[in-house]
Image (spheres, grey):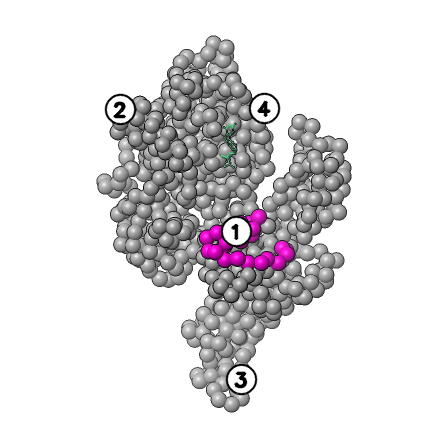
Amino acid sequence: MAINLQIVTEKPKLSSANSPKRPFPMEWTRNIGIAAHIDAGKTTTSERILFYTGAVHKMGEVHEGSTVTDWMEQERERGITITSAAVSCAWIPSVGPFKSIKHRINVIDTPGHVDFTAEVERSLRVLDGAVAVFCAVAGVQPQSETVWRQATKYRVPRLAFVNKMDRTGANFYRAVDEMRKKLGANAHPLFLPIGAEENFSGLVDLVQMKAYQFVDDSADPLGLNPAITDIPADMLAEARKHREKLIEAVADSDDEIAHKYLEGQEIGTNELMVGIRKATVGLKFVGVIPGSAFKKKGIQRLLDCVVNYLPSAIDVPPTNGQDSEGKEVPATADDQNKTVGLAFKLWSDPFVGKLVFCRVYSGQLLRGQSLYNPRTRRSERVSRLLLMRAMDKEEIDVAYAGDICALVGIKDVITGDTLCHEDADIRLEPPTFPEPVISMSIEPKSKVDQEKLGTALARLMAEDPTFRVSTNHDTGQTIIAGMGELHLEIIRDRMVREFKVESDAGKPQIAYRETISQAAEGVGKFIRQSGGRGQYGHVVVRLEPNEKGKGVEVINEIVGGVIPKEYIKPSTEGILEGANNGVVAGHPVIDFKCRIIDGSFHEVDSSELAFKMAGIFAFKEAMTKAKPILLEPIMKVEVTVPEEFQGDIMGDINRRRGQIQGMDSREGACIIAAMVPLETMFGYATDIRSLSKGRASYSMEPSHFAQVPASLLTKIVETSTKAPART
Ligand code: GDP
């Protein structure tokens, strides 16, 4: 991977990719996300970041310390929270190569719960770096592993913040150790905590070899001015040892530092910081910072590290997209290029209406510009351009490469769409989203609700790619599907709160899928010649299995106009409609390629409808011949249980058709990891309680789809066709 990092010992030089008009050069912008296991302190940490960055922003304008304090207290009463998908703030680091330079930090919201993997995936796609928050007491929790792996998949450089150092049971070193063992991260402290639990009183900076000692709450209630001192004598040996390890870790990916280290030469502070930056951006190193967001400790140091060690848009390899011929093309972070952006989140703002959050990868995005969407093949005009801040929004005229902004005026858009210059030929790869695993029927409570239901569902579906809506053709019921019971509960709650729609829901059902296991051809004919105008559609397709997770591709291979161009689209629609209801048990068909290879038409009788019907028939015939199979969702389950109950829990997992993947022990408790079909997991919360006398806990998240065993197939097919929940 090419890393274009500049070695900076003085004020860094700016690249020519910057337009002279930008308020913040690309090199001085950071797009970051804060990721955490639920309850680790993500919200508190984000709030503190906005609080301090807001304060420092103001501090440049006022000279009275107390004024700042008053302003901050006032803001605090109103409650600063991330109420938006992305918030911009500014930070001036107090140390390092970027010292005294005002940076823009865009904080992009990442959800904590794994039911919302789609949200995590799409936000990771637009970040350049992330701060992973861990709890100093709980350490690395199962869901943190999931988010960590996703961040690795998207090659997002990371820092780790070990939060809640003030809590009883906090152990910084154990948390760092777990990051190494459980996450396989090359994690090393950048700071050491002075004391822990209620005696957590400062940080030792291993780079500067200085200490930040927190001042009494009454003298510095906002934690703004810790005393900078020498390292306490009783920690000096420990600090030296850890600094040594830090240098060693960085030397692995920096030849110059390695050389000096081996020669026993002194390594300068800025030099070490640049080394840390290189190793972090190269995904070879994770710096760890201890703190307590709640007690306002360590956040300013964390912000310094964000600027000093996490990359700007120009430091990471360009994002790739495809042109209309399927060739890979880069979207380079350069203001002079044609505009390329990704719509990563849709948001309904009570004052402004529909906001489209967009990451600009290349070029400049102007207010009033017409943006082309390669999915819809249409252009729409941006009527307003906004920069979201913690407390307000700023109207801007231009967003530059690497920026995050919110667009108003773009209507026909869904999450993951590319928005680009009308002459640009690129489609960014949308984030990949997993298939839903649970579905339920919903019914509006009254006639009024019925009318609003459609609008509400359409809006929610556009916002959330793992949420699906469909109609069961046999019963006429509306079916919603998502990533878990909680996901669907939240959706129903939003329908009530935001759209004022009340609904009754059916029992949750498994969202089965179907696929094929070999290639086959199918012929579809829709020919009617009795009375009036006839109908004539004739389509021949070839179905092939597609790679797992690659979804559905329909490829037109018609040559010589045997099917005229205008009938290709309806034929494709027919194929996709056919794939909504597979031939095994009427469930959606995934992971196949369908090539339209032959067909014929009639000058007078052919119509779009006839080709659509022919498409459906061709698909069904091919699927029947292609050894179709039924797939069920498999969950990754992790149970934490005292050792005495281990045997019972494992026996129970086996009975649920589960496969044990591994076991680990931690402080007398046993952690069992297993893959278990979702079908057997309903009611698990109650069962596990009685099996372990209430002493076990578990977490579960969708993993993949697998073939339903033959012994269960008949039963599932029967129930599916009796009361199908097809989504
Ligand atoms: P999230 O679920 O990750 O967003 O976590 P929150 O920020 O909502 O925090 C969860 C709980 O932990 C809340 O009750 C917080 O007040 C508390 N909390 C967060 N940070 C700290 C901390 O540094 N120390 C202590 N003692 N509690 C904290």
Residue at image mark 2: 63
In the displayed structure, 299 sits above or below 707; it is above
In what quadrant of the picture does the N terminus appear?
A: top left
Q: Is residue 328 visible?
A: no
Residue at image mark 1: 493
* Residue type for callout 2: His
- Foreground mark, 3 or 1, reads 1
Residue at image mark 4: 169
In what quadrant of the picture does the C terminus appear?
A: bottom right
Q: Position of residue 453 (x, y in %)?
A: 49, 61
Q: Position of residue 464 (x, y in %)?
A: 48, 52
For this view, does 257 lie left or right of residue 172?
A: left
For the residue labelled by badge 3, is the local secondary structure a helix, a strand or a loop?
Answer: strand
At x 50% / y 78%, what residue is drawn?
Answer: 610
Viewer-side residue, 390 vs 284: 390
Q: CA distance from mark 4 to mark 3?
A: 77 Å
Which numbered disc, 3 or 1, marks the residue that appears first in the sequence?
A: 1
* Residue type for callout 1: Asp
Q: Position of residue 461 (x, y in %)?
A: 48, 56
Residue at image mark 3: 528
- Foreground mark, 2 or 4, reads 2
For the residue labelled by badge 4, is the local secondary structure a helix, a strand or a loop?
Answer: loop
In the displayed structure, 383 sits above or below 538; it is above
* Residue type for callout 4: Gly
Residues in magenta, as a range: 486-510
For this view, does 638 lie left or right of residue 393?
A: right
Q: Residues within 10 Å of mark 4 (few under 14, many from 20)?
A: few
* Residue type for callout 3: Arg
Q: Is mark 1 within 8 Å of ligand 1?
A: no
